[in-house]
Amino acid sequence: MTDEENNRKQITSQQTTENRVVAKNKNLYQNIITSISKEEKLLAVLIDPDKMELEKLPSFMAKLNQSYATHVFVGGSTDEEHKTDRLVFGLKKLTKLPILIFPGDVSQISSHADGLLFLSLVSGRNPEYLIGKQIEAVSVLRTMPLEIIPTGYLLIENGKETAVERVTQTEPLKRENIQKIVDTAKASEFLGMKCIYLEAGSGALQPINSEIINAVKNELKIPLIVGGGIKTKKQLDEAYSSGADVVVIGTAFETDESFFDELKKLQP
């Protein structure tokens, strides 16, 4: 094979890879559905703009890109100085993984992302976070080429007050009232949500237990996302085995080097 043929083959291979990345990042929800149908477990790493320093982003993403993470979520309960847009812009240069906004407020939306979890806090009764903030976001979202994924967001008590509670002035669902959690998730599906997100909160003392995850999963026909308080590989595996389709980790990935080592991609 000549050098010219080799170069042509390499260019074609690179274009094919790039096309796959574009397709993956443009069909976010359908790709999640496809992965679930193949019994593939998805892992999202949540990055909080208020906690991530931009100068540390390259080293953090080098670590993340070596893991078997499949998605990057960006968001937090607050957004000081509108850091989200700058963070997402930086992320796009450092990873080919799909980037989804996990918004706590309208100010956290960025046109540089691939998609957005359009959250409704169905566990609370504050109308601002059930529908008010969503209406406020529409004028911004009309101008952005983001894939919108309607998501029912359920905050579950974890042993301490969370930032979500403080900001939204709502109470989490009680862990022992599993039937109410299940019914809330199912009602969200009936309302047309495309995903359910069970959240224990950032830095939760206790992750959502297997009994809750399993009970909710058995009722749903849509993807189940589970996050909050997962700090070990064992807890991660338990969430998957209990029925989570997507597991979200945040603080543990950044602070625990041994946890990261367990999440490294298997080398061929």
Image: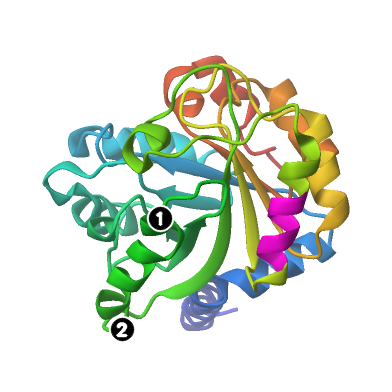
> Could you tell me if residue 162 is visible in this image?
yes
Residue 266: give x, y in percent of width and height: 69, 37
Q: Residues within 10 Å of mark 2 (few under 14, many from 20)?
A: few
Q: Quadrant of residue 228?
A: top right
Main structural element of the magenta stretch: helix, strand or loop? helix
Kindly identify the residue that appears in the image at 80 percent across and 31 percent down. 210
Give above or below for 199 relative to 160.
below
Instruction: Depth check: give the residue in front, 183 or 9.
Output: 183
Residue 114: give x, y in percent of width and height: 42, 68
CA separation in Å, label 1 and label 2: 20 Å
Instruction: Depth check: give the residue in front, 226 or 170.
Output: 170
Kindly identify the residue that appears in the image at 66 percent across and 70 percent down. 31
Q: Amino acid at mark 2?
A: Arg
Assign the N terminus to one quadrant of the image: bottom right
State which mark lies toward you, 1 or 2.
1
Q: Amino acid at mark 1?
A: Tyr
In this figure, which residue is indicated by the disc labeled 1?
Answer: 129
Residue 49 in magenta?
Answer: no
Q: Residues within 10 Å of mark 1 (few under 14, many from 20)?
A: many
Residue 231: give x, y in percent of width and height: 59, 21
Q: Which residues are magenta?
A: 183-189
Image-based side of 21 in relation to 114, left or right: right
Residue 130: give x, y in percent of width and height: 46, 59
Mark 1 or mark 2: whose residue is earlier in sequence: 1
Image-based side of 147 in relation to 110, left or right: right
Q: Quadrant of residue 213?
A: top right
Give above or below for 174 relative to 120.
above
* Circle on res. 142: 2
